Image: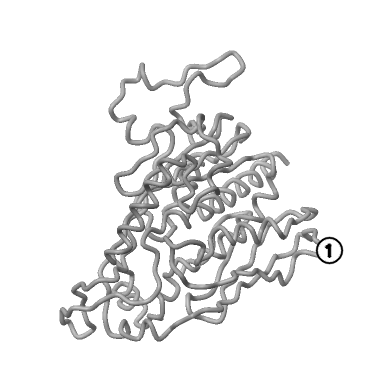
């Protein structure tokens, strides 16, 4: 399996949803970075289950233990090893999946590819793996503290936030369980998620991410364009079905005379349809992109499933699952963004030697 993300700032992870622990090794972290452990834990708290009534009720403290690479609170330049123990597994909830393949899950393809799979909570395919990404992302954020990364829920189902991100107060993102910086819209989203949950169903949505104070020059043409690296990272998140940056798919409806970002004398642009990236290289303007999440595939209602004997049977989902994964994915989007940006910062540093 491919378990590593990054080139210079590199994260390699291990662990399963119902194993003893998850963890990882961060290579390439510069020495001399003073680590705010409270910030790291706060990022994990934003991602962890059991935060509110609209997310899975699995109870995990998600407390990270650093094993190496940090001495007296400062990075040494050595590999940073860490673990996060699983505390609240209920593996028996998944016994009914041993011989069946759930629709729109990775059960079938994993067993066909590897011949053997961990069916407890999806094993390695579980979004619990993302706890590792958030740890690394929290470290990455502290390497580039002047860069501001803010992700927020911009839609749930057919309820969308229509306000331009420049008019939003990012301080409101954490003021509600949906993580939408518009309270009226957030309340509507929360009501929809609660309603879908009562039906034993799930629903999807989108997350928008805004990155400010990015210098000019990040990104490597031709095949390591900055937006391509961000897209790869976002499309690695469980349940993600789409990624667009800048004007995205709306640009297909526009004329060039409408879409071109005309320059100001200082090199900034009057508009930002480019989304802060031109030719795969950051241009100093805000980077903004949107990530689309499908509805969670596990439903707490009856569905037809395939057995390993080639039979179609009816089965009802069990266990603790998110009716909408989007609110908990906000810190994951931020974490992966930070990892990609730090990787490209380090590339620029190497290239300037």
Find residue 161 and report its horizontal and vertical position in percent.
39, 38
Give the camera-side residue of 62 and 104: 62
Image quadrant holding the N terminus, namely: bottom left
Residue at 43%, 70% (x, y): give it: 126
Residue at 31%, 82% (x, y): give it: 97
Find residue 69 and report its horizontal and vertical position in percent.
75, 65
Find residue 353 and report its horizontal and vertical position in percent.
73, 41
Give the camera-side residue of 300 and 253: 300
Asked whether, in this view, residue 313 is left or right of residue 203, the answer is left
What residue would you read off at disc 1?
A: 72
Residue 119 found in image quarter: bottom left
In the image, residue 294 above or below residue 166: below
Asked whether, in this view, residue 86 is left or right of residue 27, the answer is left
Residue at 62%, 17% (x, y): give it: 266
Give the camera-side residue of 351 and 56: 56
Colour setup of the view: one colour
- Extreme residue in the right direction: 72
């Amino acid at each position: 399996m491919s378990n590593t993300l990054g080139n210079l700032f590199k994260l390699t992870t291990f662990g399963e949803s119902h194993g003893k622990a998850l963890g990882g090794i961060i290579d390439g972290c510069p020495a001399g970075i003073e680590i705010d452990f409270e910030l790291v834990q706060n990022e994990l708290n934003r991602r962890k289950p059991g935060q509110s009534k609209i997310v899975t009720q699995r109870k995990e403290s998600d407390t990270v233990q650093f094993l190496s690479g940090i001495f007296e609170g400062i990075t040494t330049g050595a590999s940073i090893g860490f673990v996060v123990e699983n505390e609240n597994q209920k593996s028996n909830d998944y016994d009914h999946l041993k011989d069946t393949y759930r629709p729109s899950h990775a059960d079938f393809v994993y067993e066909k590819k590897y011949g053997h799979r961990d069916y407890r909570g999806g094993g390695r395919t579980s979004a619990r793996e993302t706890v590792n990404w958030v740890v690394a992302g929290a470290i990455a954020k502290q390497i580039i503290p002047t860069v501001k990364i803010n992700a927020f829920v911009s839609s749930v189902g057919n309820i969308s936030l229509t306000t331009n991100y420049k008019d939003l107060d990012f301080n409101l993102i954490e003021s509600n369980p949906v993580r939408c910086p518009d309270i009226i819209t957030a309340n509507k989203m929360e009501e929809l998620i609660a309603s879908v949950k009562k039906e034993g169903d799930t629903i999807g949505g989108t997350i928008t991410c805004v990155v400010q104070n990015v210098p000019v020059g990040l990104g490597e043409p031709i095949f390591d364009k900055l937006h391509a690296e961000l897209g790869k990272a976002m499309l690695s998140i469980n349940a993600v079905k789409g990624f667009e940056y800048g004007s995205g798919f709306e640009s297909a409806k526009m004329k060039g005379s409408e879409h071109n970002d005309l320059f100001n004398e200082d090199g900034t642009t009057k508009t930002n349809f480019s989304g802060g990236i031109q030719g795969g290289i950051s241009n100093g303007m805000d980077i903004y992109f949107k990530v689309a999440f499908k509805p969670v595939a596990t439903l707490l209602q009856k569905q037809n499933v395939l057995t390993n004997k080639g039979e179609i049977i009816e089965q009802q989902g069990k266990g603790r699952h998110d009716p909408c994964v989007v609110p908990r994915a906000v810190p994951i989007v931020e974490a992966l963004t930070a990892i990609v940006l730090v990787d490209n910062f380090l590339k620029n540093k190497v290239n300037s030697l």
